Image: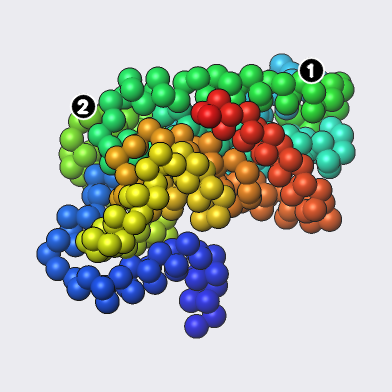
Amino acid sequence: MPSLFHFLRSNPVLFLASAGALLSFWVVPPSGALLEVLNVPVLAILFCLMAVIGGLRETGFFDRLLDHLLGRLQDTRQLGAVLVFACFFGSMWVTNDVALLTFVPFALLSLEGQGTEKQAARVIVLQTLAANLGSMVTPVGNPQNLYLYFRYQMDLGEFLTLLLPYTLASLVLLALGVVFWIPRRPLEKGGRGEAGQKGNRRPVREERVLGGLFLLCLLTVARIMDWRLTLGVVTLTILLYRPRWFRWVDLPLLATFVAFFVLIGNLGQVPAFRQLLIGFLEGREFLTALLASQVISNVPAAVLLSGFTDNGKALVLGTDIGGLGTLIASMASLISYGFYVRRYPWLQGYYLKIFTLANLAFLAVLAGMAG
C-alpha cells in the first residue's frame, strides 16, 4: 500500500487521467471502438525513442560530448553559455527531459567552486528554459510535439516553418540571458574538467547500434519508415543486445497518454459535451492551450484539447510556449528543480522566484509574437 501511495503521489496526472477514463465508461460503455481512439503509432515511436535515447545516455555519450565542448573554456560566462546551449540544441533531438537529466547534474558539478550557489541557480533556470524552448522546433523534441505532429498529419516542412521564428527568438533571448545574467569571472581549477572525467573506455559498438536505431526513429517521424517496422527492429535489437535499456522507457507517461486517449474518445462520443467544447475552443485554441498548460502541464493539455479542434498549429504553439510559466507547465522543469533543490535545499525559495520571473518574461515575449 505505501508503494502504491508513493506511485500515485509521484504520478498525479496519470492518476487523474485514469480516474477520468474509468468514470467516462459510465457515460460511454466500453466497445470495439475503444481501440480506434488509441494513437498507437505515437505510443510506439515514443517507446522507441525513450529506450534508444536512454541507452545513449547510459553509454556516457552526452557526457563525453559536453566534456569536449568544455575543454578550452576560460571564464564562467563561457561555461554557462555552453551548459545552456547544450540543452537548447540537444533537446531538439533527445527531448527536453533527457537534455535536463543529462546536462543539469553536469552543470552542478562544473559550477562548484566557480561562484555562489545563486549563480548556479541562474544557469540552471536558463538551462531549463533552453531545453523547453529548443525542444519545440522538432517533432521529436518533446512528447506533445510528436503527438500533435501525427495527430494532425503535419508535413515536416510545415512544422519546422511554424516553429522556426519562435526558436530563433528564443535563441536571442537565451543569449541575452547569458550575457546579462551570468557574470564573467576566470574559471577556478577543478570545477570544469572534473565533471565528466570517468576514465571508462568508450563503448563504440553500443553507440553505433544506438545511433542506427535513433536514425531509424527519425526516418519514422519523417514518415519514410513504417512505425511497425521501427517498433519491431528497435524492440528486437534491444531485447537481444541490451535488455536493460528498456528501463529508460517512461511507462507512466505512456500510460497517461493511453488514459487521455480513452477519456477524449469517450467524451467525444457525447454530442452535447463535444459541441460545447468545440464552440468554446473556436478562435481561442492558442490561449486555451497556453492557459491549460499552466495548470495541467503541456502534454496533457495537448492530448486533451486535440480531440475537440482541427487547429493543430494553434495547439502546437499554445502548448510549446505554454511550457513556460509555472513550474508544472512543462513537467521537464521539475527535473532541474529537483536536482538544484536536493543540492541547495536552503535556496528553494530563491530558485522558484527567479524561475518564475524568467519564465514569465520569456512567455510574455513569445506569446506576444504569437499574438
* Position above or below: 104 against 68: below
How busy is the neighbourhood of tag 1: few (under 14 within 10 Å), some, or many (20 plus)? some
Q: Residue at x 62, y 35 (%)?
A: 363
- In the image: residue 174, left or right of residue 309: right
The residue lying at 39 percent from left, 46 percent from top is: 281
Q: Which residue is mark 2?
A: 224
Check if mark 1's residue and mark 2's residue have beta carbons within 8 Å: no
Drawn side of residue 179 relative to residue 83, left or right? right
Residue 35 in the image, given as x and y percentages of width and height? 18, 59
Visible residue check, residue 33: yes
Mark 2 nearby-residue class (10 Å; few <14, some 14–19, many ≥20): few
Mark 1 vs 2, N-terminal side: 1
Q: Residue 217 at x, y = what percent?
A: 30, 34
The answer for how far apart the CA atoms under marks 1 and 2 are is: 44 Å
Residue type beneath disc 2: Ile
Between tags 1 and 2, which lies in front?
A: 2
| Residue 55 - label | none
Left or right of residue 114, residue 100 in this image: left
Query: Which residue sits at x=58%, y=29%?
Result: 368
Badge 1 amino acid: Gln
Query: Based on the displayed image, in which of its 4 quarters is residue 133 positioned?
Result: top right
Q: Nearer the viewer, residue 94 or 9?
A: 9
Relative to 312, 34 lies left or right = left
Q: Nearer the viewer, residue 319 or 144?
A: 319
Say what secondary structure mark 1 lies in.
loop
Label 2: state its secondary structure: loop
Q: Position of residue 15 (x, y in %)?
A: 44, 68
Q: Quadrant of residue 310?
A: top left
Which labelled disc corresponds to residue 74? 1
